[in-house]
Amino acid sequence: MVIDFHTHAFPDKLAARAVGSLSDASGGLPPCTDGTVEGLRASMNEGGVDISVVANIATNPRQMHAVNDFAASINSADLIAFGSVHPDAPDVLQELDRIAELGLRGVKLHPEYQDFFVDDPRMMPIYQKIGELGLITLFHAGGDLGFPGPYRCTPERLSRALPRMQGPVVAAHWGGMFMGEAVLTHLCGKDVWFDISFGQGVIPPSLARRIVEAHGADRLLFGTDTPWHAPGQELRLLDALDLTVNQREMILSGNARKLLGI
């Protein structure tokens, strides 16, 4: 089994515009799907992925409810949709209750799109509520091709916030995109999961091996960041890491099954 812990999909009527805008913002990064749910499923089928976590993001307070309604509409056996809240929404804590009531298993937060620093004290009630509800917190971590620095979820900042969080926390992109050395210094060995999405061609295999050794294969989650990377790309990176059979199985599905209760 292969579980992809980091993908994205959009409502059919918005997908083309969303993918085009995100591609332009990142300097022309070519997508590998059309951004739709069926495009994601086609990529999963081609890449041998059985289940995908779909990470939805509320980029402004006004769209928060619609984002979570969409997440609930696609939540299924093969697509485990995460909801999202925006820190500036006046009903942010009530919306977390609704996310749990909708049967969604986690919350995606993107400090760049949502304009908050991960260790900002105003975020602590949100983190506490997520933990009380038994939900997973998934952060975009590190840099982002579509945004200039200074970045809001660096490994150092996340390490300061972790003691205030409850429940499972996942730092995407090997713990911090473009920040592997800082991940080794500030996050490896701490109570946090890393998804390894968008790694192929971005993180050197030698650095990825050091993170596997320092943090443990039992705390890593396979991911792609579809529609930006396809499963085959990230599987090729895994092939370059000289993993044992057991380590590979944990990363591809065993850890995610444990975290998601599958």
Image (cartoon, rainbow, N blue to C red):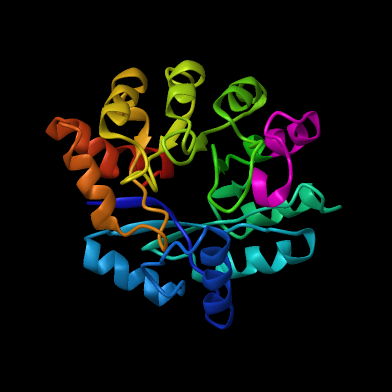
Residue 157 position (above or below residue 78): above
**Where is residue 57 shown, x and y percent of the image?**
61, 57
- Residue at 20%, 48% in the rendered image: 236
Q: Is residue 164 left or right of residue 209?
A: right
- Residue at 31%, 46% in the rendered image: 200
Residue farthest right in this picture: 90
**Where is residue 196 shown, x and y percent of the image?**
37, 41
Residue farthest bottom in this picture: 13
Residue 195 position (above or below residue 71): above
Front-lying residue, 112 or 219: 112
Q: Is residue 15 left or right of residue 164?
A: left
Residue 211 position (above or below residue 199): above
**Where is residue 21 shown, x and y percent of the image?**
58, 69
- Residue at 42%, 45% in the rendered image: 260
Q: Which residues are magenta?
A: 111-129
**Where is residue 203 shown, x and y percent of the image?**
35, 37
The secondary structure making up most of the magenta span is: helix
Residue farthest front in this picture: 27
Residue 176 position (above or below residue 91): above
- Residue at 24%, 43% in the rendered image: 237
Image label count: 0
Front-lying residue, 29 or 56: 29
Q: Is residue 99 magenta?
A: no
Q: Quadrant of residue 82?
A: bottom right
Q: Is residue 119 magenta?
A: yes
Q: Is residue 149 left or right of residue 81?
A: right
